[in-house]
Amino acid sequence: MGTKLNYNKNIEIKSIPQLVDELEGALGVNNTDTTKPIDFSVTYIPTNLIVNFDFDLTQNQIDTCDNTVNNFIYNPNYTFRRFFKINNSLGDPSKLDYDILGLNKKRVIIKGELREVGYYCGYNPTANTFSDLVVLEKRTYNRDPIGIATSRDQTSIWYLNDGNSGLTKTFTKYYTEEQGIEEGINRRGNMLSFAKTSLLNGLKEIYGEPTNQSYAFDMLTSVKTEMEYFTQGYTQPLRDAVSASTKPYLTEQIKINVIEQLTF
């Protein structure tokens, strides 16, 4: 049947989100709906607060509600946990251009493809760690038989103040032939960047700084032509050149690590 509680208490409408959160916390009720509380609803009328429950409350639960409402103090700085982080409201966040809001971007690149972009409120440059995720983009690419991108599916997830996902939408971007070729060039450029990083890290572990910088420059200079081929789609010459290199500072493990970054 449910329980209906009436309170002769003047609570401003702007206070209702905070009160709902406090009632849910006090009763141990979890909510996944961004538009209304799960299991109960609150109706506001001036000087009269009505709380309707979809289930029967025990006397202890009624006492808990009474105590929560009667001792409620509005906090003007309160952040409603079911509001979206990006706009601190229930308004559709997908209409906002979050790319221009100054959020910190964390990119995940795998085999040259940009697979994820996370938009965070916080970033610690010393530890290189991100915190407080606001929006997450997940991308998958569709390619023709020779590997040229024809389209990209992007799933965007907007997060609530309580850390749960509140909205998910998927968009599809279609590539023209020219755009598909350009995507391939960018992808190979990303792979080269990761290969260079792998080379630097491998040399640093063995020879330290700044020796590894000079070795890396020497190695990259020796395969400059093959790197240009690689960006244009001719991938095997660069892998072969690294594998066949007789540079005395290159170990087999460094070669393997570098080649791994150049493999589709």
Image: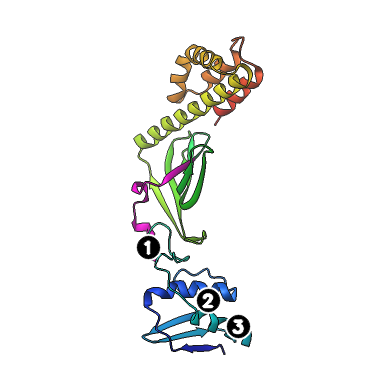
Q: Position of residue 104 (x, y in %)?
A: 43, 44
Q: Is residue 91 above or below residue 242?
A: below
Q: Earlier in the sequence, mark 2 or mark 1?
A: 2
Which residue is the site of mark 3?
61
Residue 114 appears in the picture as rendered: yes
Q: CA distance from mark 2 to mark 1?
A: 25 Å
Q: Is residue 143 above or below residue 14?
A: above
At horizontal 57% and vertical 17% (from top left) the residue drawn is 242
Q: What kind of residue is marked 1?
A: Asp
At horizontal 51% and vertical 88% (from top left) the residue drawn is 5
**Quarter of image, res 179:** top left
Which residue is the site of mark 1?
92
Q: What kind of residue is marked 3?
A: Gln
Foreground: 18 or 222?
A: 18
Q: Earlier in the sequence, mark 3 or mark 1?
A: 3
Circle 2: element type: helix
- Residue 242 lies in magenta, yes or no? no
Label 3–label 2 contact, CB within 8 A: no
Total count of labels:
3
Q: Which residues are magenta?
A: 89-107
Lateral position of residue 79 relative to residue 197, left or right: left
Q: Is residue 96 above or below residue 246?
A: below
Circle 3: element type: helix
Which residue is the site of mark 2?
23
Q: Which mark is residue 115?
A: none
Q: Earlier in the sequence, mark 3 or mark 2?
A: 2
Q: Crowdedness of circle 1 by 10 Å Cα count: few (<14), some, many (20+)? A: few
